Amino acid sequence: MRVQVNGEPREVAAGSTIVALLASLGLSDRPVAVERNAEIVPRAEHAQTLLTDGDTLELVVFVGGG
């Protein structure tokens, strides 16, 4: 199925969750804010939130430094 991630089309397997998407992008161990279809998805819900065909996701990765 097809979703948009930060404006780019991406194919994901049916039944994929936000956690699976983040893992496929190499972002599992990083603090990431996720917006799905214009709604923030709390981190506690990433594992059970299923992606659906046509979802639009915006990912914001936080970086530290000074």
Image (tube, rainbow, N blue to C red):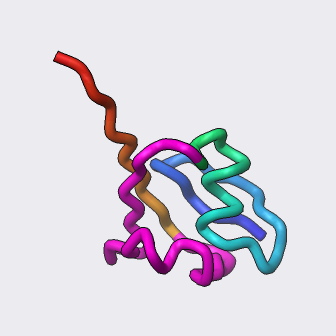
Residue at position x 46%, y 49% in the image: 6
Residue at position x 49%, y 66% in the image: 56
Q: In the figure, residue 47 lies in which quadrant?
A: bottom right
Q: Is residue 4 left or right of residue 40?
A: right
Magenta stretch: includes residue 38: yes
Image coords of residue 3 (percent x, y): 63, 64
Most extreme residue toward the left is: 66
Residue at position x 32%, y 31% in the image: 63
Magenta stretch: includes residue 40: yes
Instruction: Please name whichever residue, 64 or 10, is drawn nearer the observer in this view of the structure.
Output: 64
Q: Is residue 13 above or below residue 65?
A: below
Instruction: Please name whichever residue, 50 or 3, is drawn nearer the observer in this view of the structure.
Output: 50
User: How many numbered discs?
Assistant: 0
**Magenta part of the chain:** 29-55
Q: Is residue 56 above or below residue 60?
A: below
Image coords of residue 28 (percent x, y): 60, 49
Query: Which quadrant is the C terminus positioned in?
Result: top left
Q: Is residue 50 left or right of residue 41?
A: right
Instruction: Please name whichever residue, 10 or 20, is drawn nearer the observer in this view of the structure.
Output: 20
Q: In the figure, residue 49 lies in which quadrant?
A: bottom right
Instruction: Please name whichever residue, 27 or 5, is drawn nearer the observer in this view of the structure.
Output: 27
Most extreme residue toward the top is: 66
Q: Is residue 64 above or below residue 30?
A: above
Query: Which quadrant is the N terminus positioned in?
Result: bottom right
Most extreme residue toward the right is: 13
Q: Is residue 1 left or right of residue 66?
A: right
Residue at position x 64%, y 76% in the image: 51
